[in-house]
Image (cartoon, rainbow, N blue to C red):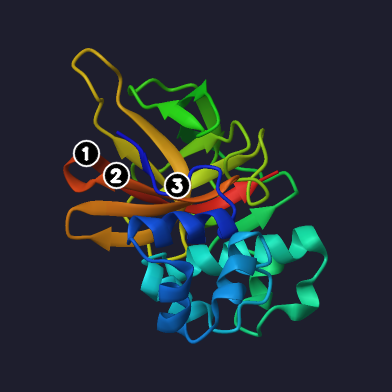
């Protein structure tokens, strides 16, 4: 089962949700992070583009720091107030993924990389992984000699603007993903008789009982129980 901590919430609404979940008043939260009640009220009403002590706020509320920073950056872009962002957050406005190669040019070579993952549709970008080969793609140089490499056709907008619908991504199944890597997570079916399924997301890390990922559109943190996860494969190449 997919567990989404903040479905369709902006940062202000997420702050309010987490504060109330911890049974804190706005005054209580303000005292914990060194601001007054009026400032907390402003955050919860959407004025979140320049929270100076944002790391403390994220930690007190139990919000992943990367998720918090990205929501703050997204708010700044939407409001046109990017100049107010802290130096730690500002790079997230335009940062590209450094861990993958991206090409707009046609690559040549043997078409021996299978395409897997049939798009199911929906806002969360779900795919079925039933072993079916949907086609064959060229093998990019970084996957030369890599057994069990495969590709997936991006469908939907759940990882926009990182990936657009219609792009192709290539996966290296033998490289351990690190925080910030893009991955395809494959999962056991929820019920007998259903197909295994999966998603394209950003890898955050493993907790004792669950896998933590990020989705971009809308920004939200996604959890899967550890025993539900079949595999987590790193994206190493994409082509638009």
Asked if residue 176 can be seen in this view, the reply is no
Q: Which mark is residue 171?
A: 3
Asked if residue 133 can be seen in this view, the reply is yes
Q: Which residue is mark 1?
A: 228
Q: Earlier in the sequence, mark 3 or mark 2?
A: 3
Q: Residue 14: horizontal and vertical position, in percent?
A: 50, 56
Q: Is residue 129 above or below residue 99?
A: above
Q: Earlier in the sequence, mark 1 or mark 3?
A: 3
Q: Is residue 222 left or right of residue 220?
A: left
Q: Residue 30: horizontal and vertical position, in percent?
A: 48, 78
Q: Is residue 63 above or below residue 82?
A: above
SS under mark 1:
helix
- Specify the quadrant of the image occupied by residue 196: top left
SS under mark 3:
strand
In the image, 204 versus 13, the foreground residue is 13
- Mark 2 and mark 1: Cα distance apart in space: 7 Å
- Proximity of marks 2 and 1: CB atoms separated by less than 8 Å: yes
């Amino acid at each position: 089962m997919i567990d989404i901590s903040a479905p369709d919430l902006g940062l202000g609404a997420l702050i309010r949700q987490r504060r109330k979940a911890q049974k804190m008043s706005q005054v209580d939260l303000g005292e914990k992070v060194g601001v007054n009640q009026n400032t907390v009220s402003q955050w919860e009403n959407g004025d979140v583009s320049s929270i100076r002590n944002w790391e403390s706020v994220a930690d007190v509320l139990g919000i992943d720091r990367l998720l918090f920073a990205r929501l703050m950056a997204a708010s700044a872009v939407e409001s046109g107030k990017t100049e107010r962002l802290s130096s730690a957050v500002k790079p997230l406005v335009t940062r590209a993924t450094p861990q993958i190669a991206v090409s707009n040019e046609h690559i040549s070579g043997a078409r021996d990389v299978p395409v897997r993952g049939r798009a199911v549709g929906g806002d969360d970008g779900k795919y079925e992984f039933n072993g079916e080969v949907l086609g064959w793609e060229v093998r990019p140089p970084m996957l030369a000699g890599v057994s069990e490499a495969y590709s997936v056709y991006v469908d939907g907008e759940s990882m926009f603007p990182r990936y657009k619908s219609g792009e192709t991504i290539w996966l290296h199944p033998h490289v351990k993903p690190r925080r910030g890597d893009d991955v395809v997570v494959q999962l056991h079916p929820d019920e007998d008789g259903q197909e295994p399924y999966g998603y394209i997301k950003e890898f955050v890390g493993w907790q004792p009982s669950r896998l933590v990922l990020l989705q971009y559109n809308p920004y939200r943190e996604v959890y899967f129980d550890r025993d539900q996860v079949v595999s987590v494969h790193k994206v190493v190449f994409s082509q638009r």
